[in-house]
Image (cartoon, helix red, strand yellow):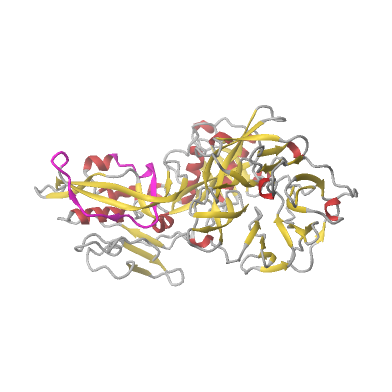
Amino acid sequence: MGTDSRGGAGTGTRGGGPVRRLVALSAGCGLLLLAGCASMPDSGEIRAVKASPRTDSQVRVEAVPPRKGATPLQVVEGFLEAMTSDDADFATAREYLAPEVSDKWQPEAGTTVLAEAPETGQAREGGSSNPGMDFPLHGRKIAQVDSQLAYEAFTPADYSRTIHLSQRKSQDGSDALEWRIDQLPPGLVLGASDFQRNYRPVNKYYFAVGRNTVVADPVFIRQRLDPSTLMDPVTQSVRSLLDGPTAELAPVVESSFPRGTRLKDGVALTFDDRNTLEVPLNEKANGVSRAQCDKMAAQILFTLKDLSSSRVDQVELQRANGGMLCAFSSGQEEAYAPDHLWPRAGNQYIVDGGGRLAVLPRDGQGVPSPVLGPLGREQQSTGQIAVARDEKTAAVVSADGRELRVAPIFSARTQIPPPLVRSKGAGPEQRLSAPSWDGLGDLWVADRDPGHGGLLRFAGGTGEPRPVRIVPEPDGARIESVRLSADGVRIALLLERDGRTTLQIGRVERTGPGDDPEVRVTALRPAAPQMETVTAVSWAGPSRLVVVGKEAGEVQQMRYIQTDGSTSAASVLPGLNNVEAVAASDDERLPLVAHSDGEGIVRLPSGANWQKVVSEGSSPVYPG
């Protein structure tokens, strides 16, 4: 069924304890099927269940409250099962807790994600100072979701916590004693498959500080459609948007909503018959200008694009008294997209067999065409390339990694300009990395020279190199690759240390004058901790990357990874051997392009398998 089971507790607990009910809705015939993970339950009462009308999930889990006289093990396993349920406010899970603990338990405080569902160890007496029973919980921790709904992936590590139970008088008025949990880990503890079933990723959008460019801020919301608690995905997403950016992006983004703006109390967001979403706000938003209101609506429209079940033709923001602040049509928000100033031609570039900058044929048929500038007119010694997002210029690193040059793509000139920088590294691996253009037109490259290296930025792709500090500095690591996001506020770095290359994502912070800011990279965090080594990476959307690498003991694979490190089984791409470079576009409709040692340049159209384009060539890139 795609849900976690824990040692016999998938369809029931030891001794005939609580049963987790899975309710599957057949889209084709509308039949309700009650099933466990492996067999039909043989105990517990039969309860009527209403099918969820939502389209984004076809399985619901209904928790079962503790039965009278339940053993400590049954209480613990019943509570763990109830945490995976769709109950509003985890009402059934709270029945397993002592009253004073139930009142204080905050499941929204965060979620610990384990590789598998938590396992219960051997129970032990609590001791004279803490009478009752202790049950250890074990697992492998792979991620954490905080109170802001932000996900953070970890290198898998042992997880060990304890649940304590004591006997309490029954709540039914009798003198019977019942086992209840009075000490437990904070928040929720879920196995990975239960987490993926219960939560869905959503990008909420804010503006880069000082710019009219939106930035994606990924979070996870619960997959629930519950009008009684106003917890449908649309309302959850907008509420999270109004709560403000996550701590990860807060220093580099800002919201157009005035501080303290919330949805009007007691409302759920609804669509009218024109697919207009009416958003009633509290009094904090009453005095905004039309221009500010448009930007507020744009943030909502970008955010709701990730909810595939929601078609929004217009957003109408309303004052606290019901009056209209502004109406903003779908499509207008594109004026704030990171790429709204650049052409969307979708051109794919490579270094051809003659060392020239060339454009691949759109349909993958035919031969690459050298560009009509100096980089395409004569035999070159070109190693790595990066095409500016406006597709007017390109940066090239020489085949030996020593020199970085920038030249026009279309020009009658035949001479390539002199290098912007020369590396003093002893060999190609200790010289310049592949370059990358950010969303503001600046060019970035890493000089990997151990003695004089570092991260360099060229404002506008010209002039003197400006060193970029990484805070804190990655101790003992060498930058192997640099990739800037289209929004210009995030950077993906491949860092090599002790023979292992890892993927790190950081913030790009700009302070000082707009025409000459001080730029630094901060808050590096692993984005693919499950991979033992990473070979290549490319941005593939506002908060997504395509990554080539190996997990421990595995063969090379290519998969999509979110900037927060989250993945899914569906993110693994068709296999391709010996991939040395990969390129993706922010437009998901465009094919992936890769360089495979032995196959040459290949492409992956949507819904197809890898197709060979040309046998000779290297360094495939999209603009950026």
Image location of residue 594, percent across then percent down = 66, 61
Q: Quadrant of residue 147?
A: top left
Residue 38 shown left or right of residue 473 in the figure: left
Give how far across and how far down residue 20 sits, in percent. 30, 61
Q: Nearer the viewer, residue 351 or 335?
A: 351
Report if residue 165 lies within the magenta region: no
Q: Residue furthest bottom?
A: 29
Q: Is residue 385 above or below residue 613?
A: above
Residue 19 picture quarter = bottom left
Q: Return the residue nearer the eye: 275 or 258.
A: 258
| 290 with respect to 421 (left or right) | left
Report if residue 235 is visible in the image.
no
- The front one of 168 and 518 is 518
Q: Is residue 113 magenta?
A: yes
Q: Which residues are magenta?
A: 104-130
Locate the N terminus by quadrant: bottom left
Q: Is residue 122 visible?
A: yes
Identify the residue at the far left of this view.
175
Residue 552 in the image: above or below residue 482 = below
Left or right for 519, reference 262:
right
The outermost residue toward the top is 512
209 to the left or right of 236: right
**As drawn, 415 above or below 20:** above
Q: How many marks?
A: 0
What percent of the width, then of the height, locates residue 250? 53, 36
Residue 536, given in percent of the width and then of the height, sits at 61, 54
